Amino acid sequence: MRDIIKTVVGIAAIIVVVSSAAESRQKKDSAPATSQSATVEYQSAANPSARTLSDFVRVGNILYLSGKLGTDSAGNLAPGGIGPETKQTMENIKAVLEKNGSSMDHVIKCTVMLTDIKEWADMNTVYVTFFKKERLPARSALGVSGLVRNARVEIECMATLK
Protein backbone atom coordinates (compact mmCIF):
# COMPACT_ATOMS: atom_id res chain seq x y z
CA MET A 1 0.00 0.00 0.00
CA ARG A 2 2.83 2.32 0.87
CA ASP A 3 4.41 1.72 -2.57
CA ILE A 4 1.12 2.57 -4.27
CA ILE A 5 0.87 5.85 -2.35
CA LYS A 6 4.47 6.75 -3.26
CA THR A 7 3.73 5.99 -6.93
CA VAL A 8 0.55 8.09 -6.94
CA VAL A 9 2.33 11.00 -5.22
CA GLY A 10 5.20 10.73 -7.71
CA ILE A 11 2.83 10.75 -10.69
CA ALA A 12 0.94 13.72 -9.21
CA ALA A 13 4.22 15.62 -8.76
CA ILE A 14 5.20 14.94 -12.39
CA ILE A 15 1.80 16.14 -13.59
CA VAL A 16 2.12 19.37 -11.57
CA VAL A 17 5.63 20.06 -12.92
CA VAL A 18 4.66 19.36 -16.55
CA SER A 19 1.47 21.39 -16.23
CA SER A 20 3.33 24.31 -14.67
CA ALA A 21 5.98 24.26 -17.41
CA ALA A 22 3.32 24.17 -20.16
CA GLU A 23 1.44 27.09 -18.58
CA SER A 24 4.65 29.11 -18.29
CA ARG A 25 5.51 28.44 -21.93
CA GLN A 26 2.00 29.41 -23.06
CA LYS A 27 2.26 32.74 -21.22
CA LYS A 28 5.68 33.41 -22.76
CA ASP A 29 4.44 32.60 -26.29
CA SER A 30 1.38 34.83 -25.94
CA ALA A 31 3.21 37.77 -24.38
CA PRO A 32 3.33 40.78 -26.69
CA ALA A 33 6.71 41.55 -28.21
CA THR A 34 8.14 44.77 -26.90
CA SER A 35 11.75 45.43 -27.74
CA GLN A 36 11.49 43.84 -31.20
CA SER A 37 8.21 45.47 -32.22
CA ALA A 38 8.50 48.21 -34.81
CA THR A 39 6.04 50.69 -36.21
CA VAL A 40 5.42 50.23 -39.92
CA GLU A 41 4.44 53.23 -42.05
CA TYR A 42 3.44 52.88 -45.69
CA GLN A 43 3.89 56.03 -47.75
CA SER A 44 0.92 54.98 -49.92
CA ALA A 45 -1.37 55.15 -46.88
CA ALA A 46 -0.58 58.85 -46.47
CA ASN A 47 -0.97 59.57 -50.18
CA PRO A 48 -4.44 58.98 -51.64
CA SER A 49 -3.09 59.46 -55.19
CA ALA A 50 -0.36 56.83 -54.73
CA ARG A 51 0.40 54.50 -57.56
CA THR A 52 0.27 50.76 -57.07
CA LEU A 53 3.26 50.89 -54.73
CA SER A 54 4.63 52.89 -51.85
CA ASP A 55 7.46 55.28 -52.66
CA PHE A 56 8.94 54.03 -49.39
CA VAL A 57 8.02 52.00 -46.33
CA ARG A 58 9.36 52.97 -42.92
CA VAL A 59 9.92 50.13 -40.43
CA GLY A 60 11.21 51.44 -37.13
CA ASN A 61 14.18 53.64 -38.03
CA ILE A 62 14.75 52.13 -41.51
CA LEU A 63 13.43 53.49 -44.80
CA TYR A 64 12.97 50.98 -47.62
CA LEU A 65 12.74 52.87 -50.91
CA SER A 66 11.06 51.41 -53.97
CA GLY A 67 13.18 51.30 -57.09
CA LYS A 68 13.85 54.73 -58.58
CA LEU A 69 14.33 55.60 -62.22
CA GLY A 70 16.16 58.54 -63.75
CA THR A 71 12.99 60.50 -64.50
CA ASP A 72 12.24 64.19 -64.07
CA SER A 73 9.10 65.55 -62.38
CA ALA A 74 7.16 65.05 -65.63
CA GLY A 75 8.15 61.37 -65.76
CA ASN A 76 10.58 61.71 -68.66
CA LEU A 77 13.85 59.79 -68.58
CA ALA A 78 17.01 61.89 -68.43
CA PRO A 79 18.45 62.02 -71.96
CA GLY A 80 22.07 61.20 -72.76
CA GLY A 81 22.55 57.57 -71.74
CA ILE A 82 23.47 55.69 -68.61
CA GLY A 83 25.51 58.50 -66.98
CA PRO A 84 22.79 61.20 -66.92
CA GLU A 85 20.11 58.59 -66.18
CA THR A 86 22.08 57.32 -63.16
CA LYS A 87 22.65 60.88 -61.93
CA GLN A 88 18.91 61.65 -62.10
CA THR A 89 18.12 58.33 -60.39
CA MET A 90 20.44 59.17 -57.52
CA GLU A 91 19.02 62.71 -57.26
CA ASN A 92 15.53 61.17 -57.00
CA ILE A 93 16.70 58.84 -54.22
CA LYS A 94 18.37 61.73 -52.41
CA ALA A 95 15.16 63.81 -52.56
CA VAL A 96 13.00 61.03 -51.08
CA LEU A 97 15.52 60.37 -48.31
CA GLU A 98 15.86 64.04 -47.34
CA LYS A 99 12.09 64.57 -47.41
CA ASN A 100 11.66 61.69 -44.99
CA GLY A 101 14.33 62.24 -42.34
CA SER A 102 17.38 60.56 -43.85
CA SER A 103 20.22 61.33 -46.25
CA MET A 104 22.70 59.70 -48.60
CA ASP A 105 25.08 59.39 -45.62
CA HIS A 106 22.57 57.02 -44.02
CA VAL A 107 22.09 54.64 -46.97
CA ILE A 108 23.07 51.13 -45.90
CA LYS A 109 22.20 48.99 -48.95
CA CYS A 110 21.41 49.53 -52.64
CA THR A 111 20.30 47.20 -55.38
CA VAL A 112 21.12 48.34 -58.93
CA MET A 113 19.30 46.87 -61.91
CA LEU A 114 20.79 47.48 -65.35
CA THR A 115 19.31 46.53 -68.70
CA ASP A 116 22.87 46.17 -70.00
CA ILE A 117 25.35 44.95 -67.38
CA LYS A 118 28.15 46.15 -69.67
CA GLU A 119 27.16 49.69 -68.58
CA TRP A 120 28.02 48.89 -64.95
CA ALA A 121 31.32 50.82 -64.99
CA ASP A 122 29.69 53.96 -66.43
CA MET A 123 26.85 53.71 -63.90
CA ASN A 124 29.35 53.18 -61.08
CA THR A 125 31.36 56.27 -62.04
CA VAL A 126 28.30 58.43 -61.31
CA TYR A 127 26.91 56.31 -58.45
CA VAL A 128 29.99 56.61 -56.21
CA THR A 129 29.92 60.43 -56.39
CA PHE A 130 26.80 60.42 -54.21
CA PHE A 131 28.54 58.76 -51.25
CA LYS A 132 31.51 59.53 -49.05
CA LYS A 133 34.31 57.04 -49.71
CA GLU A 134 34.26 55.92 -46.08
CA ARG A 135 30.47 55.43 -46.12
CA LEU A 136 29.83 53.38 -49.26
CA PRO A 137 26.71 51.25 -48.72
CA ALA A 138 26.51 47.53 -49.39
CA ARG A 139 25.38 46.98 -52.97
CA SER A 140 24.21 44.35 -55.41
CA ALA A 141 24.06 44.91 -59.17
CA LEU A 142 22.35 42.73 -61.69
CA GLY A 143 21.43 42.68 -65.33
CA VAL A 144 17.73 42.54 -66.17
CA SER A 145 15.81 41.96 -69.37
CA GLY A 146 13.87 45.22 -69.18
CA LEU A 147 12.74 48.08 -66.93
CA VAL A 148 9.65 50.30 -66.76
CA ARG A 149 9.63 53.23 -69.22
CA ASN A 150 12.45 51.53 -71.10
CA ALA A 151 14.89 52.83 -68.49
CA ARG A 152 18.50 51.66 -68.44
CA VAL A 153 18.93 51.71 -64.66
CA GLU A 154 16.74 51.34 -61.59
CA ILE A 155 18.08 51.62 -58.04
CA GLU A 156 16.38 50.76 -54.78
CA CYS A 157 17.87 51.35 -51.37
CA MET A 158 17.54 51.10 -47.61
CA ALA A 159 18.60 53.85 -45.24
CA THR A 160 18.49 54.57 -41.53
CA LEU A 161 16.88 57.73 -40.24
CA LYS A 162 19.13 60.58 -39.06
Image (spheres, rainbow, N blue to C red):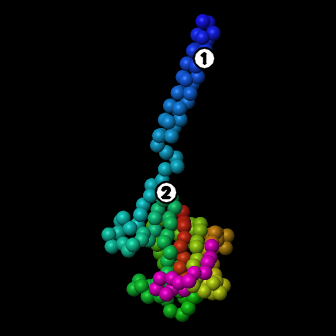
- Residue visible at 63% across and 73% down in the picture: 140
Q: Amino acid at mark 2?
A: Gly
Neighbour class for label 2 at 10 Å: few (<14), some, many (≥20)?
A: some
- Residue visible at 49% across and 77% down in the picture: 68
Q: Residue furthest bottom?
A: 80
Residue 63 x/y as whole percent: 50, 64
Question: SS of the residue at dot 1?
Answer: helix
- Picture quarter with the N terminus: top right
Residue that label 1 marks: 10
Residues 58 and 18: in front is 18
Question: SS of the residue at dot 2?
Answer: loop
Residue 111 x/y as whole percent: 58, 73
Residue 69 x/y as whole percent: 49, 81
Horizontal side of residue 82 vs 133, given as left or right: left
Residue extent of the magenta highlight: 140-152
Neighbour class for label 1 at 10 Å: few (<14), some, many (≥20)?
A: few
- Residue visible at 39% across and 86% down in the picture: 74
Residue 33 x/y as whole percent: 49, 45
- Earlier sequence position, callout 1 versus callout 2: 1
Residue that label 2 marks: 60
Whether residue 145 appears in magenta in the rendering, the answer is yes
- Residue visible at 60% across and 17% down in the picture: 10
**Residue 133 occupies which quadrant of the picture?**
bottom right
| Marker count (numbered) | 2
Q: CA distance from mark 1 to mark 2?
A: 51 Å
Q: Amino acid at mark 1?
A: Gly
Whether residue 154 appears in magenta in the rendering, the answer is no
Note whether 55 is above or below 123 in the view shown: above
